[in-house]
């Protein structure tokens, strides 16, 4: 397929569409961009000469989106001392891999969604959602392409995810952009069609309904959060990641935690949370937590401690629950490991990525693990970027978790967009499941997020400190959310609709331009 000048222009335009959409994620978090930045992309897809061109257009748009959202991959490699070429290659390879889903969306949409005008927005939205839903479950990806993540600044809209799950807002964003593109084309001289006005009305009705439901839920928040509360403390030591496992700094790191815990307090905590891999040594079979155990006994509090653990030959990224007596009462092992950072898909590459391979070769934790039993209720463990995967928190909430503790270490990424994206997705997990999220990060962002996604306490990025916060003892959602109880039924529905479009389209030869 020859790449003409006109087609190259379309490629560049698609790249720009993706990049603009990426700006809707934190940071900079220009949420409104997502509601119209994809409209030109659908205009381009409509004018592609077949599905193969649409695949290339989708690949370009996906590259623009993920390249913008994940620019911090390049920065992280440079912070770790990797050469510019290797850093650029790592960023480009990851971005290209993640852009493949957009290429699939483009090809399927151009082939099977360009049928009847009245169905076109919903066909595109179902296909887009189906591909995202499918990829979220089988690839070790960052899940940044869940388009609902672009709406972090609109709490009222996010409340609908407690009913419909993480993909509904993305579905609505896609449908809105398709309708906007068609309305734009008709304003430029194409014949006006009643289907466009009807679809616009449906989009506005769904948007208004979602917003109205969110306003109603947020209005109930004050009444449901009144009553007694318990003190929790989140530690944010701001240890330099690139000195973390250097033996000569081990004593300083422990002293750092001691100083935070010695600071004056107005009330004793029920629970203290230390961040991911916070101890400067490996904990063997649950032993070696002497310093932390001493603080459990001194404070009379439960503690959750992030540490690298070893049992036999297996190294794991773990979180330990210590009782007020200092005994190990529970342990959680990370279930979703970071490619290249925690396991090597291609072992021969390990020697090229230096300190980023510091924890390479970890063993993955079991998919179902015991919840932590505490005076605050049952707590589910979550480590670092596991918060990016909706299915993990949902499964734990369905088993009875009232709170999710996310211990993390975003010190690798310094002051880039990465830590803001990682913190932001915890708001979605809180709302989707109607749980409280407690997040303790080495360099931040640490905070308490209530079941409505409201950040009730926070320590900003790179701010060293101890966050003393209150968590209500009453559980406002003892049954959790509809989504937590019934699963991602909306994603499954879109997958079935997409399958139907493909089967029906192959039989009927769908694909004409309307």
Image: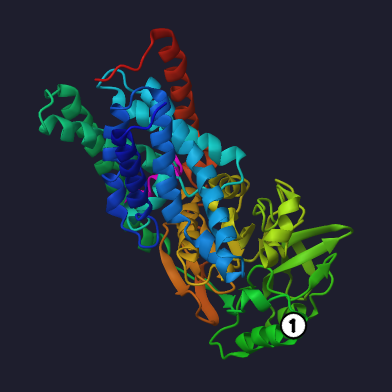
What residue lies at 50% left-to-right and 36% top-to-bottom? 133
Q: How many marks?
A: 1
**300 or 234: nearer the viewer:** 234
Q: Is residue 298 visible?
A: no
Residue 83: quadrant of the picture: bottom right
Instruction: Determine the residue positioned at 70% across, 46% down.
Output: 367
Return the x and y of residue 183 as percentages of the image width and height. 17, 33
Residue 463 placement, left or right of 337: left
Give the percent coordinates (x, y) of residue 507.
43, 8
Q: Quadrant of the N terminus?
A: top left
Q: Quadrant of residue 76?
A: bottom right
* Residue 165 shown in magenta: yes
Q: Quadrant of the C terminus?
A: top left
Residue 405, position as x, y percentages in the image: 59, 62
Q: Is 223 colored magenta in this rendering?
A: no
Left or right, residue 255 beside residue 51 = right
Please name the residue shown 51% across and 44% down the image: 96
| Residue 260 placement: quadrant | bottom right
Q: Indicate the secondary structure of the residue bearing disc 1.
A: helix
Magenta residue span: 157-166
Q: What residue sits right under mark 1 in the picture?
A: 250
Q: Is residue 133 above or below residue 447?
A: above
Q: Position of residue 345 (x, y in %)?
A: 70, 47
Name the foreground residue: 197 vs 40.
40
Residue farthest along the top direction in this orientation: 507
Q: Residue at x 81, y 69 (%)?
A: 283
Q: Is residue 223 visible?
A: yes
Q: Residues within 10 Å of mark 1 (few under 14, many from 20)?
A: some
Snapshot colouring: rainbow
Magenta region, main secondary structure: helix
């Amino acid at each position: 397929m020859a790449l003409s000048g006109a087609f190259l222009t379309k490629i560049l335009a698609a790249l720009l569409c993706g990049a603009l959409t990426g700006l809707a994620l934190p940071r900079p978090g220009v949420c409104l961009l997502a509601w119209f930045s994809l409209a030109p992309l659908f205009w381009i897809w409509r004018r592609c000469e077949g599905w193969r061109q649409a695949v290339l257009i989708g690949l370009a748009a996906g590259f623009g989106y993920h390249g913008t959202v994940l620019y911090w991959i390049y920065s992280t490699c440079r912070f770790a001392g990797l050469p510019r070429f290797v850093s650029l290659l790592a960023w480009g390879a990851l971005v290209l891999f993640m852009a493949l889903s957009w290429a699939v969306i483009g090809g399927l949409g151009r082939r099977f969604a360009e049928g009847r005008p009245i169905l076109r927005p919903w066909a595109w939205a179902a296909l887009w959602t189906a591909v995202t839903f499918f990829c979220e479950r089988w690839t070790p990806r960052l899940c940044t392409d869940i388009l609902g993540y672009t709406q972090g600044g609109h709490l009222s809209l996010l409340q609908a995810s407690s009913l419909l799950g993480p993909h509904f807002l993305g579905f609505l964003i896609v449908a809105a952009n398709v309708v906007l593109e068609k309305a734009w084309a008709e304003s430029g001289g194409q014949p006006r069609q009643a289907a466009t006005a009807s679809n616009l009305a449906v989009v506005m009705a769904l948007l208004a309904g979602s917003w109205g439901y969110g306003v109603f839920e947020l209005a109930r928040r004050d009444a449901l959060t009144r009553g007694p509360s318990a003190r929790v403390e989140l530690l944010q030591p701001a240890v330099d990641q690139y000195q973390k496992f250097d033996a000569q700094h081990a004593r300083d790191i422990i002293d750092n935690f001691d100083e935070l815990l010695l600071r004056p307090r107005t009330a004793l905590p029920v629970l203290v949370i230390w961040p991911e891999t916070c101890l400067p040594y490996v904990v063997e079979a649950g032993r070696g937590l002497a310093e932390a155990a001493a603080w459990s006994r001194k404070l009379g509090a439960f503690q959750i401690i992030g540490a690298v653990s070893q049992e036999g030959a297996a190294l794991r990224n773990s979180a330990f629950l210590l009782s007020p007596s200092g005994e190990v009462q529970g342990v959680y092992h990370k279930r979703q490991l970071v490619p290249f950072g925690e396991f090597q898909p291609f072992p021969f590459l390990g020697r090229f990525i230096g300190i980023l391979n510091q924890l390479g070769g970890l063993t993955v934790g079991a998919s179902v693990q015991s919840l932590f039993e505490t005076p605050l209720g049952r707590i589910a463990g979550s480590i670092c970027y596991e918060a990016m995967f909706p299915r993990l928190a949902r499964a734990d909430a369905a088993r009875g978790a009232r709170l999710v503790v996310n211990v993390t270490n975003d010190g690798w990424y310094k002051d880039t967009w990465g830590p803001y994206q990682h913190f932001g997705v915890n708001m979605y997990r809180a709302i989707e499941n109607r749980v409280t999220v407690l997040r303790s990060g080495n360099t931040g962002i640490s905070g308490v997020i209530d079941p409505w996604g409201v950040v009730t306490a926070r320590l900003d990025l790179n701010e060293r400190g101890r966050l003393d916060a209150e968590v209500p003892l009453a559980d406002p959602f003892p049954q959790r959310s509809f989504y937590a109880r019934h699963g991602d039924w909306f994603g499954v529905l879109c997958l079935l609709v997409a399958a139907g479009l493909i089967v029906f389209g192959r039989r009927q030869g769908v694909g004409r331009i309307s």
